[in-house]
């Protein structure tokens, strides 16, 4: 067996110490990274369990979450039904009135006559017309179905219906 000099043995010993130091540093860095990852996993696990300490309760936590999601689904379904009912009720309500003022007779009178349409979303409702003269005022009501009437409608009454259904004012004025 060959003999090694004191200097060679010293160099080999220093190289071994340096290698061990580098290995120890690498292991320390790896341990710090793993420790950080374990901390994140523990925080997520604790949040999932809702503060429960026992690992056996993980399935209970999952069951609670599933139950909560099912309850939310039921609440969402109930809200959807209520919204549908409200939409149905709202479609039967008067949207906005369409009102047209005019002079019904050849004599200028400050546009005291009117036609007012009160309609729902489907165009059903009524149109009221008030004809004002110097001596009297007459008021007429006509039923409206689907934006039309079985009774003859004046131009002003039809214009009031169009306004109630949201027709563009610029189009109506033309």
Image (spheres, rainbow, N blue to C red):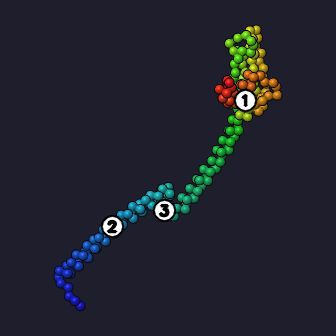
Question: Would residue 32 be visible to someone looking at this image?
Answer: yes
Would you place residue 132 above or below residue 121 in this image? above
The picture places residue 118, in percent across and down from the top left corner, at 72, 27
Q: Is residue 43 left or right of residue 157?
A: left
Of all residues, the one furthest to the front in this rendering is: 174
Q: Residue furthest right?
A: 150
Q: Quadrant of residue 28?
A: bottom left
**Quadrant where the N terminus is found in the figure:** bottom left
| Label 3 neighbour load within 10 Å: few <14, some 14-19, many 20+ | few
Residue at (67%, 27%) from the top-left corner? Answer: 171
Q: Which residue is mark 2?
A: 28
Give coordinates of residue 169: x percent, y percent.
66, 26
At a point 50% along the width and 57% down the height, the residue shown is 48
Q: Which residue is mark 3?
A: 54
The residue shown at (71%, 28%) is 162
For the C terminus, the image quarter is: top right
In the rendered image, the vertical position of residue 166 relative to residue 49, given as above or below: above
Which disc number belongs to residue 69? none
Q: What is the quadrant of residue 154 in the picture?
A: top right
Locate residue 40, reporting x and y percent. Answer: 43, 59
> Residue 147's image quarter?
top right
Q: Residue at x 72, y 29 (%)?
A: 119
Viewer-side label of 3, 1: 1
Regarding residue 124, the answer to whether it shows in the image is no
Of label 3 and label 1, which has the lower sequence position?
Answer: 3
Task: Compare residues 169 and 91 and report the one nearer the observer.
Answer: 169
| Helix, strand or loop for disc 3 | loop
The residue under label 1 is 119
């Amino acid at each position: 067996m060959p003999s090694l000099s004191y200097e060679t043995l010293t160099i080999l010993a220093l190289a071994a110490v340096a290698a061990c130091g580098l290995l120890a540093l690498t292991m320390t860095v790896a341990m710090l990274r793993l420790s950080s990852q374990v901390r994140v996993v523990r925080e997520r696990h604790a949040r999932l369990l809702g503060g429960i300490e026992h690992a056996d309760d993980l399935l209970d936590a999952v069951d609670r979450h599933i139950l909560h999601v099912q309850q939310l689904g039921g609440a969402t379904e109930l809200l959807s039904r209520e919204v549908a009912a409200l939409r149905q009720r709202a479609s039967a309500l008067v949207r906005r009135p369409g009102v047209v003022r005019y002079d019904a007779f050849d004599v200028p009178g400050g546009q005291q006559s009117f036609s007012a349409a009160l309609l729902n979303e489907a165009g059903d409702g009524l149109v009221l017309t008030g004809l004002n003269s110097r001596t009297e005022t007459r008021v007429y009501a006509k039923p409206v179905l689907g934006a039309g009437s079985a009774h003859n409608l004046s131009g002003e009454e039809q214009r009031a219906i169009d306004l109630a259904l949201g027709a563009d004012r610029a189009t109506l004025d033309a």
